[in-house]
Image (cartoon, rainbow, N blue to C red):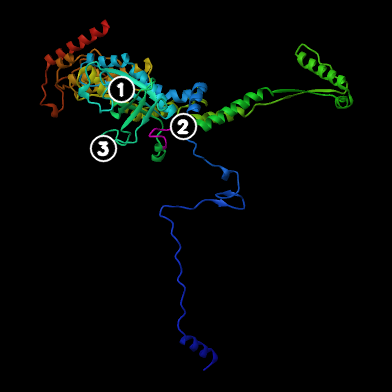
Amino acid sequence: MSKRSRKFGKDSRQPPAKHKQETPEPKLPRGLTTDAFQNVLARLGHGTPNLMEGTEYPLTRLTQNYQLMNSLYRNHWIVRKVIDTIPEDMTRNWITISTQLPPDEIRKLDKLWRVRRVKQKILEGLKWGRLYGGAVGLIMIEGHDDILQQSLDFDMIMPGAFKGLIILDRWSGVYPSAELVEDIDDPEFGSPESYQITLDGGQTMLVHHSRIVRFTGREMPYLEKLAETYWGASEVEVVFDELKKRDNTSWNIAQLIFLANLRVMKSEDLGEMLAIGDQRMQTDIYNTLQAQNWLMSNMGLHLIGKNDEFQTHQYTFSGLNDIYESFMLDIAGASQIPVTKLFGRAPAGMNATGESDMQNYYEVVQQQQESVLGLVIDKLLPVMCMSEFGAIPDDLDYTFNPIRTPDDKEVADLAEKKTQSILEVYNAGLISQKVALKELKQLSDSTGMFSNITDADIEEAVNNTHQGELGFGGGLGYGESEITLGSEETNRASLSQSDSRGVTKFRRVLDRIRRRLRND
């Protein structure tokens, strides 16, 4: 047997070697990613020694700095506009109540808004909620002073008992309780159950959440909401860093104005005179230079030696305006308010109108109306109805009026187009006279026209849908041949072909409306 074969055989007779069991590498949790860009040689990316990696974002919770919030709101015009602009636009055109109540009853509600200054109080609460991160409005009901800790019962509201709102910000003696609303049917599920309120006289009372309307700042995650005791974040906290950039840039530009024109005089023997001259000579030199500096003007003279030289150095401000405007854009973006509205500037650029910016802003305001203002009105309207009427209408509802107020020309064009559309549909026989009058009356909400059409006028109108029954002043010219009565399609054969009585009645209604419009 060869040496190689004997060695192989010997190895084969030996027991197999025990392999060391390898420990499996720990697996990262699912969803955790550790990939990032990095270039060590160029000192770029994650974990490399560069200036960008030294950036940190510490948790400051600036909202809790009460003195800073007060100082900025009192002294800084940009902060005041950031806080006030959106709430003022949210409440400017207010709401339209839609219900089957008679117009006189709806006017009573409108008067109650004014008498109790509810709109002004809501505006105040919205401002303090944006500034401090939270505020409340205590619903004042006469005769409920001793039962504020109990849930609000609408049946306990007597006629004329609603007395308005008391607005208190989060730092004015309002503290939410640790207990939360546990009823899932309650719209305020998960919010504080009650609030401890301390009045100016030191009186402390516990108020149930159903008697409180909340105004909160920007929403935050759950743990941060706990840190803020169920309030929100101030709007100042979002724009504060951008505000510091703008303010420092503005002050530096203002300081550069003092260095815009520097005057320098070179004197050949000035160094020697100051070095070897006595105190009297130095004083004379200083007084001479100071007198020349004071008397320098366009009408004066400046005496210098033969080898002396007088120079001026002027500073150019090119490029500073672009830097300053970029900081203005950052503040506008953080506050969600266009530059044209926040800073009062005209739209920049060729053919720029600012319409797109304002449209985006209107959408922001509408979203705030639905998510913030709507919750407040939902809580107040039933209370006001019980106080004014003793009952809550089943169909009680409201809509926010458009934020943008159109001018007279836009209203006239809108009314003409909508009226023309109604006439075309009516003349085509698709709707009846009664439906046409209803559509015209509905235009009064958006155009202010046809508001004198009464329910009695609509009831007297004919409910038939005859093609070509034109009671509004003649044909519209949308066809080559004139359509006459009796020329309907076969699917309209079941309709009465002659209804002179209905046409006469409809025209009589229209004549009555025209007379009212002329009298107005």
Badge 1: residue crowd in 10 Å (few <14, some 14–19, many ≥20): many
Q: Which residue is mark 3?
A: 184
* Secondary structure type for disc 2: helix
Badge 3: residue crowd in 10 Å (few <14, some 14–19, many ≥20): few
Residue 10 against residue 199 in the figure, above or below: below
What numbered label is drawn on residue 322?
none
Q: Nearer the viewer, residue 173 or 3?
A: 173
What numbered label is drawn on residue 64?
2
* Horizontal and vertical percent position of residue 43: 61, 49
Amino acid beneath label 1: Ile
Q: Nearer the viewer, residue 286 or 511?
A: 286
Residue 12 against residue 508 in the figure, above or below: below
Label 1 vs label 3, nearer the camera: 1
Amino acid beneath label 3: Ile
* Secondary structure type for disc 3: loop
The quarter of the picture where residue 489 lies is top left
Magenta-tinted stretch: 227-233
Q: Which residue is mark 1?
A: 139
Left or right for 340, reference 293? left
* Horizontal and vertical percent position of residue 463: 14, 20
* Horizontal and vertical percent position of residue 120: 37, 18
Residue pictured at 45% horizontal, 71% vertical:
21
